[in-house]
Amino acid sequence: MKTLTLLIGYAAVAVGTTFMLPQILKSWKTKRVDDLSLASVTLYFANSIVANARALVISICQVFLKLKYRVKPTPAAQIEHAAEHGCPILNAHGPSTNDRLEQRAE
């Protein structure tokens, strides 16, 4: 079902972005725009602006929510991750957190 929805969406974008192309080509070739409806062109232009503004707002909201609700690792997990990847700062300051925890356990 998701694939069908995506295909319909892609088809809508393709049709929506190319339906004015024949009119543009005809106007270019004939150098005449008598049969062109100003209302239609204005509506198409306004729709493009609204659609892009709406897409921008949705994108900004998605980024905001991703940053706000992301899973933040605990400090211990961050230190463990840094130690696993050979962080030179951890090694330069003496024993690692794991070493200190092991010493406390003994």
Image (spheres, rainbow, N blue to C red):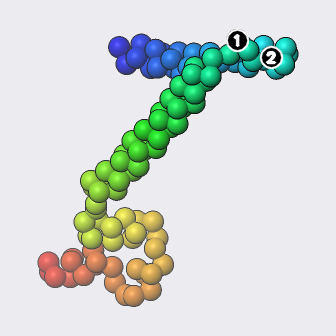
Q: Is residue 12 left or right of residue 97?
A: right
Foreground pick, 29 / 8:
29
Q: Is residue 66 visible?
A: no
Q: Secondary structure at mark 1?
A: loop
Q: Quadrant of residue 29?
A: top right
Q: Amino acid at mark 2?
A: Arg
Residue at position x 40%, y 69% from top? 82
Residue type, numbered disc 1? Asp
- Tell me whether the residue at label 1 lies in contact with that at label 2, contact meaning CB atoms closer than 8 angstroms: yes
Tell me which corner region of the image, top left, top right, bottom left or bottom right, holds residue 75: bottom left
Q: Which mark is residue 35?
A: 1
Q: Position of residue 36 (x, y in %)?
A: 68, 16
Question: Under tag 2, what secondary structure?
Answer: loop
Q: Looking at the image, which is closer to me, 29 or 60? A: 29
Give the residue pinned by disc 2: 32
Question: Residue 5, percent across and down?
Answer: 40, 17
